Image (tube, grey):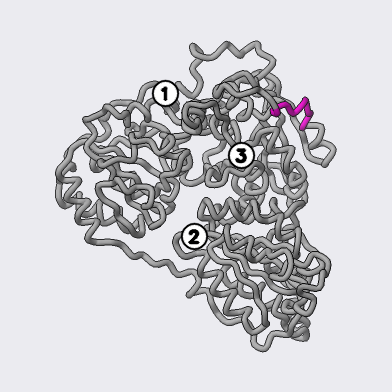
């Protein structure tokens, strides 16, 4: 230890720990490197504690420009690291601004610790500025509906127990956000004892499985020949065993829109995305009249509207075996032949061992399965951009989004993290951005579907990777106008994120939804905006791409090597209709016209 380190340690020992310091200590034990938030008077003690630790090389604060952005950043950090994402805010409006981002994490089962402040306890109910206690605007009650647990520390002796409990709850399956609200006078109280060790307890993972259900599943598998596998979003850490399982039993497989992040989309057994923005090959495989299918095995699937094409009977019927780690998901598969609950990596490791020993399918040549329609020499479906179906765009002033996403599929480095915002960007990316090596690097947040989520989430992820892995954010002009200011956070942190704006001057999903649904065409015009100039005004390099010639000139290698973000303003053709027709049909009520939300 150097003399400077000794002096720093000695200086820190002179300052007695407050309970704000105890919170930071606990988070550092879990390896958490950042807390995302916006400071204010009541939360100031926590920022003081972070400042002390940052000076000593410890946990750092990242100041978002809006509290919802802070929650989105914590979400992205958790997705990249597998750790708990942490966000914080001051009391009152600071806390309420967090709610959208926290609700999104709750819908997508992202582990998050949400810390909000309260006015000092003696001021509760006395009309103090930004009072959000139970006697005023009750933020603890608000968060109760969008977190796994929401509580307030009403006495300093409660803090450690409630904090540890919250951290464990956030990580226990199903994972999700937890909220703890702390009065500022509690944060400033001298801690009686230093923080205890919680690393082993809070990071433990339970691997309970239903062995009887697994045995029954093996019997079902041995009785049939034609099996289809549906891969959902909840397959983290299990994707390798699931793919081995599909190959071993020669099962063609599809994925949900969010589940595509776990599969090799060039695999010869893959038939595409089923559900929102999905592929015709996946729909054809699961068509209602296909009596050749004996079993459909859905894995890690919430079976929500977007992932099932509106709870389609093509997927959810008596041929279904539903394998999941979350009991709540089984409430939407009551028609299933069998439900298997437990730790997915363990379940599929056991299944693979049992099926291998049984030799039931072992001699089958999975590699000889028929190729999905339209696979080119690069391993990508030609349907990503079929020049015979789309208008010629070589001489067009506007870029076809189909062509753009096909281009990105081939142009992005192998380890690129992709964050896609709600709106038409969902549909185009689900249909046309196809890779062989997603491995969890492709991110959608379709549980709540908050616009502008990707803008903040990509910052949280890039912060965790220290800018070493390529990161892109694909967002629409409508989403970007909601949260453009967060670009300055990426600049301040020197993160080489490429922000890609789909600029068509409209709320595209609203416009096309109204047209496809036969509704009045209104409320979708945004007007023309030069987003590259906006970026330049923030000190960020902005690039306008009007045509395929412009697109070919973009040097992604240079942009990823920079110390700071880049914004690319893609001028896309707004008249190209995204693959969202099934969504319109699914939300129509009694045959009436309807438009999609978000």
- Near-viewer residue (347 or 446): 446
Q: Considering the numbered disc 2 on the image, is that residue within a helix, a strand or a loop?
A: loop
State which quadrant residue 531 falls in.
top right
Write the residue at 19% across / 50% down: 356
Magenta segment: 523-531
Is residue 247 visible from the viewing direction of this image? no
In terms of sequence position, does the residue under pointer 3 or pointer 1 come before the other? 1
Mark number, residue 377: 1
Q: Does the magenta stretch include residue 528?
A: yes
Which residue position is annotated with label 3?
Answer: 421
26 sits to left or right of 366: right
What secondary structure characterizes most of the magenta part? loop
Which residue position is annotated with label 2?
Answer: 175
Image location (x, y in percent) of residue 166? 56, 70
Write the residue at 20% across / 49% down: 355
- Near-viewer residue (89 or 383): 89
């Amino acid at each position: 230890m150097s003399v400077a380190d000794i002096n720093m340690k000695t200086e820190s020992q002179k300052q007695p720990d407050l309970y704000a310091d105890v919170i930071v200590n606990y988070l550092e034990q879990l390896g958490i490197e950042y807390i995302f938030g916006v400071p204010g008077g009541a939360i100031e003690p926590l920022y003081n504690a972070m400042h002390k630790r940052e000076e000593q090389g410890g946990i750092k604060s990242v100041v978002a420009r809006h509290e919802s952005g802070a929650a989105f950043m914590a979400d992205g950090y958790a997705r990249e690291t597998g750790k708990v994402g942490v966000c914080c805010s001051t009391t009152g409006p600071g806390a309420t601004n967090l709610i959208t981002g926290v609700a999104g994490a709750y819908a997508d089962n992202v582990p998050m610790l949400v810390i909000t402040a309260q006015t000092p306890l003696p001021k509760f109910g006395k009309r103090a500025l930004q009072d959000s206690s139970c006697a005023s605007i009750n933020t603890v009650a608000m968060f109760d509906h969008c977190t796994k647990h929401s509580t307030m520390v009403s006495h300093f002796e409660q803090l450690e127990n409630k904090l540890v409990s919250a951290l464990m709850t956030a990580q226990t399956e199903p994972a999700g956000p937890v909220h703890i609200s702390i009065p500022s006078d509690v944060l400033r109280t001298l801690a009686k004892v230093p923080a205890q060790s919680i690393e082993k307890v809070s990071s433990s993972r339970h691997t309970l499985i239903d062995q009887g259900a697994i045995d029954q599943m093996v019997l079902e598998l041995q009785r049939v020949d034609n099996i289809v596998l549906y891969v959902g979003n909840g397959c983290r850490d299990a994707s390798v065993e699931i793919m081995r399982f599909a190959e071993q039993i020669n099962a063609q497989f599809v994925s949900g829109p969010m589940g595509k992040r776990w599969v090799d989309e060039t695999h010869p057994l893959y038939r595409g995305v089923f559900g929102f923005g999905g592929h015709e090959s996946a729909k054809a495989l699961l068509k209602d009249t296909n009596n050749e299918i004996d079993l459909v095995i859905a894995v890690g699937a919430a079976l929500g509207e977007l992932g099932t094409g509106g709870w389609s009977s093509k997927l959810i019927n008596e041929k279904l075996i539903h394998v999941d780690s979350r009991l709540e998901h089984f409430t939407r598969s009551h028609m299933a032949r069998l439900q298997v609950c437990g730790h997915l990596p363990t379940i599929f490791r056991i299944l693979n061992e049992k099926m291998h020993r049984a030799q039931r399918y072992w001699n089958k040549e999975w590699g000889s399965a028929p190729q999905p329609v339209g696979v080119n020499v690069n391993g990508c479906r030609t349907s990503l951009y079929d020049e015979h179906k789309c208008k010629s765009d070589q001489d067009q002033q506007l870029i076809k989004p189909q062509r753009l996403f096909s281009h990105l599929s081939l142009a992005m480095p192998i380890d690129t993290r992709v964050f896609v915002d709600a709106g038409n960007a969902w549909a185009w990316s689900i249909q046309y951005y196809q890779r062989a090596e997603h491995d969890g690097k492709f991110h959608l947040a379709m549980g709540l579907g908050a616009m502008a989520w990707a803008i903040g989430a990509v910052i949280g992820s890039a912060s965790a990777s220290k800018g070493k892995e390529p990161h892109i954010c694909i967002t629409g002009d409508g989403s970007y106008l909601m949260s453009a200011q967060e670009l300055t956070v990426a600049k301040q942190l020197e993160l080489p994120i490429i922000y890609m704006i789909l600029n068509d001057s409209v709320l595209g999903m609203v416009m096309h939804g109204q047209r496809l649904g036969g509704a009045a065409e209104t409320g979708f015009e945004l007007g023309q905006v030069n987003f590259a100039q906006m970026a330049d005004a923030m000190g960020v390099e902005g690039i306008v791409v009007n045509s395929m010639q412009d697109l070919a000139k973009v040097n992604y290698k240079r942009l990823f090597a920079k110390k700071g973000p880049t914004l690319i303003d893609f001028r896309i053709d707004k008249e190209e209709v995204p693959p969202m027709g099934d969504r319109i049909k699914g939300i129509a009520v009694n045959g009436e016209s309807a438009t999609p939300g978000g």
